[in-house]
Image (cartoon, coloured by chain):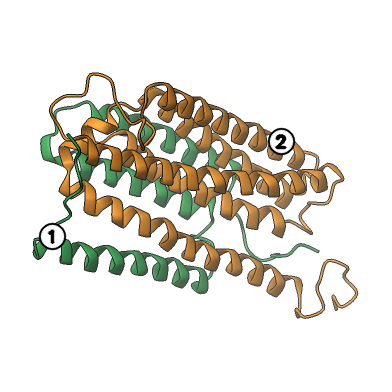
Chain colours: A green, B orange
């Protein structure tokens, strides 16, 4: 008998659709890097990376079909990274910490 | 009852519970991996915000075409892994080894391109240390550019080690798949491996813009 007899799973067509989306987003991030976006380069690159990662997590890793525990773990991971980034950067960006690197010559 | 099912370990009530426990275990491990890579990337963010020009100038020495090709290679390998799982779930067990073998070939291709890139970095004196001497470097300080290259080698190196571990497991999966082990009755190992492989793909999805496409 099958392991999950009641759960329907995504079709191969969905996987190819997601694959196409990932390729288009990869091309977009390269093209965008060579456009005059000024200070918005990093934000655009990160937004595209987050979109690609979301496609992989939701469809290839089946987070959409997974139970509550899996969603809880994903949220916990994101929260952990969020706390690490937010508190570290709040410190470095607000207190004028000297990160001087020895620059020979 | 399923008590006599050879696929069921004795400490699980049924196959469904066994499957849930295995995938949940991998998800938990991946959450720790997010923090593992996240720690290095936090350090990267702190220093990049301090030395934006130097990080950009150092990044422009890296090959965007090679890295973009590798991004596509990894996305293709994620597709083949998910198709291997789909084939097993749909009972088409003869397709499972084909898709797993394709994944292995794509993984090898990624590492081959990465190795070629490292050899270019070596020839262009981009390895941090006493040999770090990018040709025609302008007035910007070298030390912080060297720090960017340190992040580059640590991040891509850790990623490559994850690829190697994944490919070791993949060889084991493939030998089982060639003997017809995976089907709609037994696909947990393929699924758990897939979760890991997709995560390694996601790491690269972030490394590509953060290392190769630094613009301010």
Q: Which mark is residue B101?
A: 2
Q: Say whether marks 2 and 1 touch (CB < 8 Å).
A: no
B195 or B211: nearer the eye?
A: B211
Q: Mark 2 lies on which chain?
A: B
Residue B4 place in picture, x, y as percent: 91, 74
Residue drawn 27% across the image and 41% down it: A45
Residue drawn 42% across the image and 41% down it: B153
Q: What element carries label 2?
A: helix
B131 sits left or right of A36 in the view? right
> Is the C terminus of chain A in the top left, top right, bottom left or bottom right quadrant?
top left
Question: Which of the 4 quarters of the picture holds residue A91?
Answer: bottom left
Residue drawn 74% across the image and 43% down it: B171
Residue B72 place in picture, x, y as percent: 47, 31
A104 sits left or right of B190 in the view? left
Mark 2 vs mark 1, foreground winner is 1
Q: Residue A93 carries which label?
A: 1
- A16 in relation to B191, above or below: above
B72 or A51: nearer the eye?
A: B72
Residue drawn 35% across the image and 45% down it: B151
Q: How crowded is mark 2: few (under 14 residues within 10 Å), some or many (20 or more)?
A: many
Residue B169 place in picture, x, y as percent: 69, 50
């Amino acid at each position: 008998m099958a392991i999950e007899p009641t759960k329907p799973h995504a079709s191969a067509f969905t996987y190819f659709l997601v694959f196409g989306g990932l390729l288009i987003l990869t091309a977009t991030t390269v093209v965008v890097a060579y456009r005059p976006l000024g200070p918005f380069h990093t934000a655009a690159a990160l937004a595209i990376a987050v979109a690609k990662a979301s496609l992989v997590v939701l469809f290839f890793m089946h987070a959409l079909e997974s139970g509550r525990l899996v969603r809880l773990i994903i949220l916990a991971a994101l929260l952990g990274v969020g706390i690490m980034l937010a508190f570290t950067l709040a410190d470095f960006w607000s207190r004028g910490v000297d990160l001087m690197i020895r620059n020979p010559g | 009852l399923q008590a006599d099912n050879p696929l069921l370990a004795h400490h699980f009530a049924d196959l469904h519970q066994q499957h849930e426990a295995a995938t949940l275990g991998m998800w938990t491990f991946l959450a720790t991996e997010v923090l593992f890579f996240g720690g290095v990337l936090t350090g990267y963010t702190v220093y990049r915000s301090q030395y934006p020009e130097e990080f950009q100038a150092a990044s422009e020495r890296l090959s965007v075409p090679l890295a973009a090709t590798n991004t596509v290679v990894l996305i293709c390998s994620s597709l083949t892994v998910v198709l291997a799982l789909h084939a097993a779930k749909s009972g088409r067990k003869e397709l499972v080894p084909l898709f797993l073998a394709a994944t292995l070939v794509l993984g090898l291709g990624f590492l081959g391109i990465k190795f070629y890139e490292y050899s270019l970095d070596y020839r262009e004196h981009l390895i941090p240390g006493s040999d770090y001497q990018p040709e025609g470097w302008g007035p910007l300080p070298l030390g912080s550019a060297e720090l960017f290259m340190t992040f580059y080698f640590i991040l891509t190196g850790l990623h490559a080690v994850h690829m190697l571990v994944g490919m070791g497991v993949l060889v084991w999966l493939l030998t089982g798949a060639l003997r017809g082990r995976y089907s709609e009755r037994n696909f947990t190992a393929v699924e758990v491996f897939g979760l890991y492989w997709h995560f390694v793909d996601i790491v690269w999805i972030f490394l590509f813009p953060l290392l190769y496409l630094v613009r301010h």
